[in-house]
Amino acid sequence: MLDGRLAHQVGNWPTRPANLEPGKAISSTKQLLEISMMASSLYYLYSDRVYEELTMEEILEAIDLYANIRTPAESGAPQISPDTIFYLCRELIEHKALIPYCPSCEVRYYSSVEQRVRNACPFCRKVGVGDFGNSEH
């Protein structure tokens, strides 16, 4: 609690229900950018281990990094709730989502097989290395 408010109120996180399939919910570049910041935080801390089982402590550490990154960035999309982040990690483990690398922008981004926007870097819109449909996995 901070000043009598709960964490979800301070962070303006959506409350229940959690998004059980975060990849399916991506329908705009703003949403892709927001979820890419979280995915990049996971990858920065744990590299390819994101495709394995992470502990809750590791996920919470990535959430802290994500919250610190997004504060100055303010993408315009709401901050992702911790429970939705848990399901994002499940998508990575189940290989329904990847965190490819964009050599043009030199960033990692989120890419889901089920997202409604094109699987590409949210900044330059080019398909990165390791993305679905790219032969350079």
Image (cartoon, grey):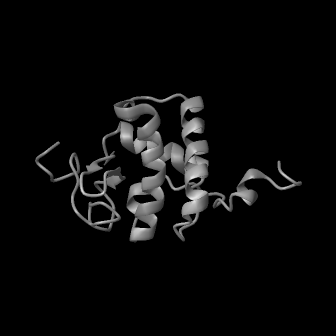
Q: Residue at x 48, y 44 (%)?
A: 41
Residue 133 shown left or right of residue 120 in the figure: left
In the image, farthest residue toward the right = 4
Q: Quadrant of residue 116?
A: bottom left
Q: Residue at x 74, y 58 (%)?
A: 10
Residue 108 screen position, x and y as percent: 35, 49
Residue 105 screen position, x and y as percent: 30, 57
In the image, residue 11 sits, relative to residue 136, either above or below, namely below
Residue 112 screen position, x and y as percent: 32, 54
Q: Quadrant of residue 49?
A: top left
Residue 87 screen position, x and y as percent: 48, 46
Given residues 72 and 11, the one toward you in this image is 72
Residue 42 shown left or right of residue 48 in the figure: right
Residue 16 shown left or right of residue 109 in the figure: right
Residue 21 in sight in this render: no
Given residues 68 and 78, the one toward you in this image is 68
Q: Residue at x 61, y 58 (%)?
A: 71
Residue 66 in sight in this render: yes
Q: How many marks?
A: 0
Q: Residue at x 47, y 53 (%)?
A: 37
Image quadrant holding the C terminus, namely: top left
